[in-house]
Image (cartoon, rainbow, N blue to C red):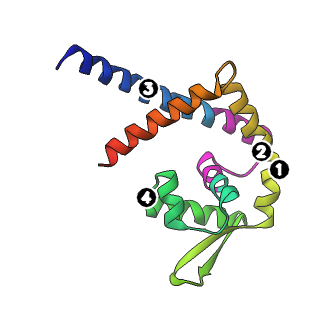
Amino acid sequence: MTTTIQNTVSLARDLTRAMNETRNYLRQYLQVKIKEHEVDITFELLEILGYLYWKDGANQQEIADRLIKDKSSMTYLIDGLEKREMVERIEDPNDRRSKLIYLTEKAKGLEEMLSPWITEIYEKATEGVKASDIKKALQLVQKMNENLRK
């Protein structure tokens, strides 16, 4: 392996490790907030709610694909949200075999509490970082993901 390739591979490993570390810091921060405010929810359930706040009425497979979860764990997680009365499954009018996942009023009310937490952690994470640098990093990671999907 040439030195240039070794250097690129090493940098890619460091980047991947750093992205995982960032995710862990986000998880830890949100878990502290959840505990402080005694909210009956987990980080994984928050990820689903976050997607539904963006696109309410998504089907289970779409959510699983976006969050990179397998179908069986997604079923379990959505069951947990349903038990907490935060989502409801409604039959898809275009495909009776599929259910669409919709937020309940309870979950919509929770968004008011969660939104400032999310803003706060991302503001902290991006202190001293230019938007143009974030855009370049995003393009780089998207390109790496595209390469891996091939």
What numbered label is drawn on residue 145? none
Q: Are marks 1 and 3 in contact (CB under 8 Å)?
A: no
**Relative to 38, 140 lies left or right:** left
What numbered label is drawn on residue 115? 2
Dot 4 surroundings within 10 Å: few (below 14), some, or many (20 or more)?
A: few
Q: Are marks 2 and 1 in contact (CB under 8 Å)?
A: yes
Of the residues under marks 1 and 4, which one precedes in the sequence?
4
Image coords of residue 3 (percent x, y): 23, 14
Q: CA distance from mark 1 to mark 3?
A: 33 Å
Amino acid type, mark 4 = Asp
**Relative to 93, 32 lies left or right:** right
Secondary structure of residue under mark 1: helix
Image coords of residue 137 (percent x, y): 51, 30
Amino acid type, mark 3 = Leu
Image coords of residue 83 (percent x, y): 67, 66
What numbered label is drawn on residue 112? 1
Amino acid type, mark 2 = Ser
Q: CA distance from mark 2 to mark 3?
A: 28 Å
Q: Residue 42 in magenta?
A: yes
